[in-house]
Image: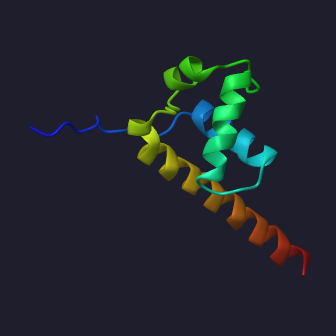
Amino acid sequence: MVARPAPVGAPSDEALEFVRFCYERKKVGWPELYDEMCGVAGRGLFRGWGSEDLAANGIGLTLFEMPALAALVSAVVTEDRARLRVRIAAEV
């Protein structure tokens, strides 16, 4: 039998806020942003939350949760870059 992770629902607003917070601090992509997220969690820089608080809100920093987290980061970074392109196009 092969262990499979439980299906992941839509990320919570808090999970998206956390990723955006980390991305705004350091405009890098995956996997560098993962390092930033671990650092933020370790120091409680987002709402004072540590890794357990983040896990309760849909942000898992473990190896098994990494694929879902990478997908969430990708979506947030893509969204940010699209907003930037629109803003630049509006200025031209």
At 72% from the left and 47% from the top, the residue drawn is 23
Q: Position of residue 14 (x, y in %)?
A: 62, 30
At 50% from the left and 30% from the top, the residue drawn is 58
Report whether residue 9 is seen.
no
Q: Position of residue 38 (x, y in %)?
A: 63, 34
Vertical arrangement, residue 80 with respect to residue 45, above or below: below
Name the foreground residue: 52 vs 16. Answer: 52
Q: Which color mode does the image show?
A: rainbow
In this rendering, position of residue 83 left or right of residue 13: right
At 53% from the left and 33% from the top, the residue drawn is 12
In this rendering, position of residue 2 left or right of residue 47: left
Q: Position of residue 1 (x, y in %)?
A: 8, 37
Q: Using the rendered view, name the quadrant where residue 87 is placed.
A: bottom right
Q: How many marks?
A: 0
Q: Using the rendered view, name the quadrant where residue 7 is placed.
A: top left
Report whether residue 43 is seen.
yes
Vertical arrangement, residue 45 with respect to residue 91, above or below: above
Vertical arrangement, residue 20 with respect to residue 39, above or below: below
At 73% from the left and 27% from the top, the residue drawn is 46
Which residue reaches farthest bottom?
92
Q: Using the rendered view, name the quadrant where residue 50 is placed.
A: top right
Which residue reaches farthest left?
1
Name the foreground residue: 42 vs 70. Answer: 42
Q: Position of residue 72 (x, y in %)?
A: 53, 48
Tell me the quarter of the image containing the C terminus.
Answer: bottom right
